[in-house]
């Protein structure tokens, strides 16, 4: 609803960041709440949402659903090839995609997170093929939710400085400029309207929402007065990425390093939702392919057992608990699951070497 309404207002001369105009349009489409849903993403996001604006809400919603289903399935399938599963049956990546709980909820809610997954996948694909201009363009797509993968931007900048791959910078700047300019063609004031939205006093802002993050859990369970504790996870994330880069910069490979960067970034981000965790698919696919290649049966690995337990707990809790805040444990659990996988992978390498 938020993306469709904002895109439609942009195309037809309205203000895509006006609560009043959004509510009027959304009520006509069947919205019952007295408060509109607002697209808080930056204005260049409208370049991706505006194409759905000319349709009626029902038609636009259906096309949006098909678009995002396609993005998820194609991304997971491509990740399967990137991590070494090319030529194998397509059933396993398909099963991974549809059985992952955040996939179900991101499609039900209609959020834009699958586009972030597609951007990550495209970045890995083109960087692996040394198509650096296209890789930079793919990275620009991640800017529609810049806070979610904030650690990626830090290590991305460090990697660019070390490797001097300026074609990536050119690709990112060019696509970034294009998607930033398109909304201006329809509304020359769209950026000032976006910043004016933050000056409206009587509407809740994103940081006021009870998101399933460590920052929000600290604010709720310890108290809002401990500001430094709320920012501690993000500070720890920055310290970790700098240490991680220093340790691995000499042999940095994006397919190998991206899963941990994404997991830690979402875990320590000051604003994220459970459905944003569709970006964990690089880690899930990497682990699935390695486990599939081992001689032991898949259910003998602790990483698989942990993954099943986490997924079942998440799915079953959703029956009784809808409030996103209570899933602040999910991202830490997924990171721990990935650490278990890395431990088993390292143990297997050590045993093979002996």
Image (spheres, rainbow, N blue to C red):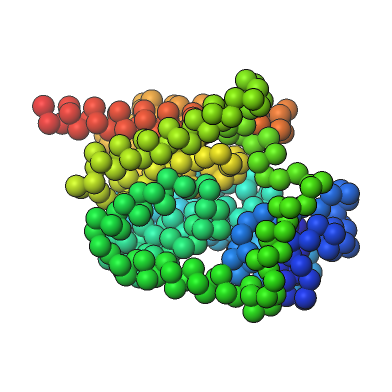
Residue 203 drawn at (x, y percent): 79, 47
Residue 280 drawn at (x, y percent): 47, 44
Which residue is found at the position 62% from the left and 48% from the top? Answer: 106
* 347 to 4, vertically: above or below: above
Q: Is residue 162 left or right of residue 212?
A: left
Q: Is residue 116 left or right of residue 201?
A: left
Residue 327 drawn at (x, y percent): 61, 30
Which residue is found at the position 49% from the left and 50% from the top? Answer: 94
* Residue 25 visible in the picture: yes
* 245 to 168, vertically: above or below: above
Residue 5 drawn at (x, y percent): 76, 63
Q: Quadrant of residue 213?
A: top right
* Residue 66 visible in the picture: no
Quadrant containing the N terminus is bottom right
Which residue is found at the position 45% from the left and 53% from the top? Answer: 76
* 266 to 233, vertically: above or below: below
């Amino acid at each position: 609803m938020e993306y469709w309404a904002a895109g439609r207002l942009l195309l037809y001369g309205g203000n895509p960041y006006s609560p009043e105009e959004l509510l009027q349009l959304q009520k006509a489409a069947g919205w019952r709440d007295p408060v509109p849903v607002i697209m808080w993403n930056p204005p260049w996001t409208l370049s991706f949402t505006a194409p759905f604006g000319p349709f009626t809400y029902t038609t636009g919603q259906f096309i949006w659903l098909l678009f995002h289903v396609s993005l998820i399935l194609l991304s997971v399938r491509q990740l399967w090839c990137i991590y070494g599963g090319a030529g194998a049956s397509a059933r396993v990546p398909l099963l991974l995609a549809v059985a992952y709980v955040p996939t179900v909820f991101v499609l039900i809610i209609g959020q834009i997170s699958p586009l972030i997954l597609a951007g990550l996948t495209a970045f890995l694909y083109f960087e692996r093929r040394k198509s650096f201009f296209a890789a930079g363009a793919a990275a620009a797509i991640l800017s529609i939710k810049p806070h979610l993968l904030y650690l990626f931007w830090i290590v991305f900048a460090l990697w660019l400085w070390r490797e001097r791959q300026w074609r990536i910078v050119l690709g990112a700047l060019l696509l970034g400029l294009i998607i930033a300019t398109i909304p201006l063609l329809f509304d020359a004031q769209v950026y000032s309207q976006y910043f004016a939205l933050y000056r409206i006093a009587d509407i809740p802002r994103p940081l006021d929402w009870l998101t399933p993050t460590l920052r929000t859990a600290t604010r709720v369970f310890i108290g809002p007065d401990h500001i430094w504790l709320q920012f501690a996870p993000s500070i720890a994330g920055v310290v970790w990425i700098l240490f991680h880069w220093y340790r691995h910069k000499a042999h940095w490979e994006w397919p190998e390093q991206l899963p941990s960067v994404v997991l830690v970034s979402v875990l320590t981000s000051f604003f994220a939702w459970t459905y944003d965790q569709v970006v964990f698919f690089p880690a899930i696919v990497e682990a699935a392919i390695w486990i599939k290649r081992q001689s032991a049966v898949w259910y003998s690995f602790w990483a698989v057992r942990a993954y099943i337990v986490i997924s079942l707990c998440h799915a079953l809790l959703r029956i009784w608990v809808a409030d996103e805040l209570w899933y602040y444990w999910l991202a830490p659990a997924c990171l721990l699951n990935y650490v278990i996988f890395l431990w088993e992978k390292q143990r297997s390498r050590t045993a093979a070497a002996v």
